[in-house]
Every structure is written in C-alpha cells, then in structure tokens.
Image: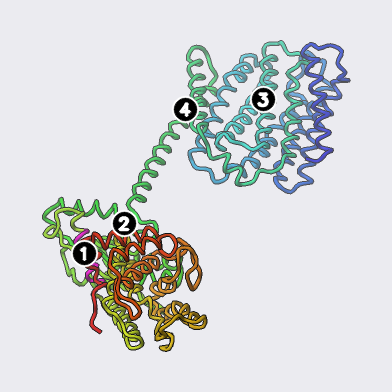
Amino acid sequence: MPVLVRLLLLVCAGWCVLYEARALGVPALPVGDVKLVHLVVMGVGAGLCVARAVIRRGERAAWALIGLALVSWIAGEAYFTQVLWDDSQPPVPSWADAGYLGLPPLLFCGLVLLLRARIRGLPRTLWVDGITAALAAGALSAAIVVQAVLGSAAGGWLAVATNLVYPLADLVLVGVIAGGLAASGWRVDRTFGLIVCAVLSFWLADSVYLVQVARGTWASGGPIELGWWGAALLMATAAWQPPATAARSAARRSGGRLVIAMPIAFATLALGVLVSGSAGHLNAVAIALATASLAAVMVRLVLTFQQHTQMLQRSQHEALTDALTGLRNRRALLGDLEAALERGGDRHLLLLFDLNGFKAYNDTFGHAAGDQLLARLGRALHTALDGNGRAYRLGGDEFCALIAVTGDVDALRAAALQALSEDGTGFTISAAAGAARLPEEAANASEALKLADQRMYAHKSGSRGSAALRQVRDVLLGVLDEHDGLDEDRVHAVARHAVAIGQRLGLDGEQLDTLARAAELHDVGMAAVPDTILATPGPLSANDWTFIRAHPLIGERVLNRAPALRPVAALVRAVHERVDGTGYPDGLRGNEIPLGARIIAACDAYEAMIRDRPHRAARPVPEALEQLRRGAGTQFDARIVELLCTEVEHPATTAASRHPTTAASPR
C-alpha cells in the first residue's frame, strides 16, 4: 500500500475514532465541524477507490463502480447535510434520496465483478450454499427492517415506495455478501474480508436509521452514523490490498467444518424467521425468503447425496482398476474367479501372461517408455478379447485374461499372445502363457492362479526366446572352453547356488533367469585375456593385472551386443566389486553393488575354494564356509554369506534348486 494512501486512511480513521468517542459521551474532543468533516472522510474513501481503478489494471472496472457508488452516496449526503440536516421531517423523496439510491446498483455491480474472479469454477454445492446464505440473511433483514418500514409507511405511493427501496436494496447487498462468503467456503482473502465488514457496517447503520425513523426516535449526529462513514474507509482500505494469488484463494476455499456448519446455521436462521412469523404478523417478503432458503437446503442435500454416490462409485472403480492400463486389477480378478467358480455350470479358461524382454526394454528405454508400452499392450489385450472375456493387469509385466468357454478358445488365446507382442529397433517383446480350466482343474481362485502360474513359467522357460538366449549362452561358454578350458560343473554349480539364494531373497522368475545367466557368464570377458597371462605360474605383474581387471568391462561389452542380455551384462560388470569398496572395475561399495553381482561373487568364491585348482588342492567345505564368513562385510555381503552357508549346510527343496535356467544344456 503506498505511503500517501496509508497516511490518508490513518488520519481519517483517527478522526472517526474521536467522533465516535464524543458521540458516545466523551466531552471536549476536537472533531471540528462534523457536517463538513464527515463529507471529507467519505470523499477520501471514494477518491481512493477511484484512484485504485485508475492506477492499477487488475479489477479496474469493479473498483471504478464501487468508487462511483460512494460518490453517488456522498452527493446525496452533501445535499442532506446542507439542506435537510436540521429538518425533523425531511421530505420523501428528495434529491438526497436520488444520491443515496444510486449507491446500491453501482455497488452491487462492483461486488459481483469482484466475486466473479474469486468464486470461478465452484462446485454446485457451494453455489447452493451461497444462495441459502443470501436468502436467509435477506429473510432476517426483511423481518426486522422491512417490517418496521411497512409498519410506519405513510404519505403518497412515491414516498412509501422510496422508503421501501432502502431496506430492499440493503437486503440485496447483504444477500450478495452472504452468498459470496458461503460460495468461497467461508475462507476469504483480506480484500473481500474488508468489503464484508464495509457492507455489514453500512447495513447496520441503515437498518438502525430506518427502524428509528419508523419509531420517530431518529436524531442526526448519533453514534450509528459512523457506520456509513466507516464503510467508505473500509472500502478504500480493501481497494489497496495486494491481490490474492490463485493458490491462496484455492487453499482458503478448500473448506473445513465451516463448509457444512454455516449452511446449517443459515438454515436454522431461516427456520427461526418462519417460527417467529407464526407467532405474529410477518411481511410476505421475509416469509418468502426464509421459505426459499429452506428449499435451497433441500437442494443442497440432494446434491450432497449425488456427490457421495459418485465418490463411492469412483472409489469402487479405482479399487478394481489398474491405474496405468485401465484394465481390471488383481482384486477384481479374484472376485471374478470366485464368482465364476460359484456358478458351477459355466466353464472358463484362466490365462496368465508374463512378458519376455520387458526388463531389458525398461533398462534400455527407461521406465516412462516402459509404462507406455504396458499401456499399449493392455489396450491391445482388451481389444483382442473382443467381448469374449475380461483382461487384467496383475502388476509389473503380468497380465491375465478370464474367458468364458463358449467359442474358439484357442483362437482367443493366440490373439491374446499376439496382442502382448511388439518389436522394434533393439527390442522384442513377447509373452509366455499359462492356462487353467475352471472348474475342472481348480476348486478356488488361489489354486487356479497357482496352476496357471506354474504352466506360464514352464512355457516361459521353453519359449523360443529363452531357447535363443540359452543358445547364445552356450556359444559364449564354448568360447571360454576353447580359450582356457571350462569347468562346466563349476559354472552350473555357481548358477544353482545363486538362484537358490535369489529364491530365498524373494526374487521373481525373470530376475532369477537373469541371475542364473550372469552366474554362468560372469567370466566371459576372460576370453580376451592373453593365454600367456592365464598360464603365468607365479604372481602377476602390474601390467598383467590391468588385463585381468579389464575382463568385467569386456564381458559387459560383449553381452550388451544382445539387447535381451543387457540386464545380465550389468551384473557381469560388477561381480568383482567388494563391499568395502576395494574391488574393480568401479570401486563400488556396499549396496551400490547390484544384488545379483553380490550373490554371484560369494557363490563363485565358494565353488572356487572347494574344487582343485592348478596351484592348490580343494579345501574342505567347512573350511571354505569359514573363509567366506571371515570375508563377510569386507569382500562379501554378510547377509548373502549367511544365506549361502545355510543353503550349503541345509539345502532347500524348493523350486529354486530345480529352476530351468540352471540345468546343463548340451553344447
């Protein structure tokens, strides 16, 4: 707020305080000629509103109208002060009335313009709350002020009409303010808060004046007149407040208990007006407004019920829908399976799908592209079923379909597999599928999912994509065998231990596949190390170690040539890292090392110790395990060492030990 504006407002407010104190009985206060000074105070208020409209662009039209409204009031007040101030029964209507009655329409238009920006985009319930509040406030005003004016109306029709316009105009303004407050959720910015105070101050002064005139007790110069003058200063103060940001306005509008408490309060007010009217004569305006307010409350109840119903339906839909693909989710599948089994006579086919190559796609193109791929495949699966079944996404890259056995099921299965396939530059996505027939193969949803899952992984391990990867693995292992000789039993033992530990850690099927292949191929880069270095009988030179430490990087580059082996390549690079950070090639520490690489490192070291080597004999198993424990926390991950020791000492008879990727393949 500019300094000059602040100074003018403070001076005028100080005079108002002095005037009110003297009007309430404090003698000898220097207030000057009240008939002149109060016009100056109101003129300052009007002038500041007009100046605000001229200087600042925002809400210019609104403040121009409010300023003109105050100017019109001042014109009427000036005429009344100079001509009718001492008249005990001033004529009605007069030129003063013309000025006074110019304020309500101009002020109404200005307030509507200000409110429009603050309550744009409101929900219907808040609009109805605003109407309820406006009607209830109007009913109260009509019951008090209009009733008093009607009771004392005298003179010709023009005088009666003029006297009635005042309370009706005040009724409209108070209704606008009450409606604006309710529509904003009873949370207003500083500007609108000051405007509310100004309108209420004006309404209170007008109401007391009209009632006292009706009773014949009005006298000029009383304390209530400050309500009119103070309203002008409050409007001017509001005009120069900083504008509220959209974020702050939205936060204020967001509600709280007032959002429901205030409509109830105004409904109670309207009911009170009707109850009081039943005990005596009450004008039709008050009765009509109070009745309309209660009707608005009933509309609010209907809208609230509709909102709650829509929210319940939306929450139920979200609870059964996968957010990424829009397909039904696991919870919906379980419910549909139970419903299908309960019907008994209907036969269904449950199809469970797992994508091949999705992890490599994610690693290559990023998670955002992976999400887009899943969404595309989900839409394609839904379309492929063509109303003959329902599609689901269970999470990750797992999809599902539940098909009623009424037509060509094999064709639908083929269409679903085709829908979950996509290829392009550097990637190929396909799907492995497992099926379970209901109800003949499963008595409940859990059994059906378990059976379909087992068959899906059997399909996955025997699919052409997995076979191709095994062939690539076999070629690379063959290269190692030709270069330096290959202990095939050791390679598969390392993979078997790694998969068993991965199973204990809760890794899923694709992660276990990647872990097994990395365990078998972690030394593929050794094919690039010269034979002379590998055959060196004694300690290696610094230059020789340079070649040795490069072999994980070479292995990574070789494996990255096949996009499906890129996750394997990431593990191969990190197998020779140590948890204390002294490993190679990157000096990773602790959990910076991929979990799969930490598993392979421990398993490889164990198998190396319990087998005969050219330079030493095999160690007994207990001694090898003790050596692993001594290296826990420095060379190896301590948790993985304990899991490996447990696996060796108490092998688990789980699917991990029979994982298809660990079985030896003929080369």
For numbered disc 4, what is the local secondary structure? helix
Task: Look at the picture and state if 615 lies above or below 183.
Answer: below
- Label 1: few (<14), some or many (≥20) within 10 Å? some
On the image, numbered disc 1 is attached to which residue?
454
Label 3 – label 4 distance at C-alpha: 23 Å
Cβ atoms at labels 3 and 2 below 8 Å apart: no
Q: Amino acid at mark 2?
A: Arg
Residue appearing at x 29%, y 76% in the figure: 612
- Circle nearer the viewer, 2 or 4: 2
- Label 4: few (<14), some or many (≥20) within 10 Å? many
Q: Nearer the viewer, residue 551 or 296?
A: 551
Q: Earlier in the sequence, mark 3 or mark 4?
A: 3
Label 3 – label 1 distance at C-alpha: 79 Å
Q: Earlier in the sequence, mark 3 or mark 2?
A: 3
Magenta stretch secondary structure, dominant: helix
Q: Which residues are magenta?
A: 449-460
Residue 420 appearing in the image: no
On the image, numbered disc 3 is attached to which residue?
203
For numbered disc 3, what is the local secondary structure? helix
Using the rendered view, name the quadrant where residue 469 is placed.
bottom left
Q: Earlier in the sequence, mark 1 or mark 2?
A: 2
- Circle nearer the viewer, 4 or 1: 1
Q: Nearer the viewer, residue 1 or 662?
A: 662
Task: Look at the picture and state if 195 lies above or below 544.
Answer: above
Q: Position of residue 92 (x, y in %)?
A: 73, 21
Q: Amino acid at mark 1?
A: Gln
Cβ atoms at labels 2 and 4 below 8 Å apart: no
Q: Which mark is residue 328?
A: 2
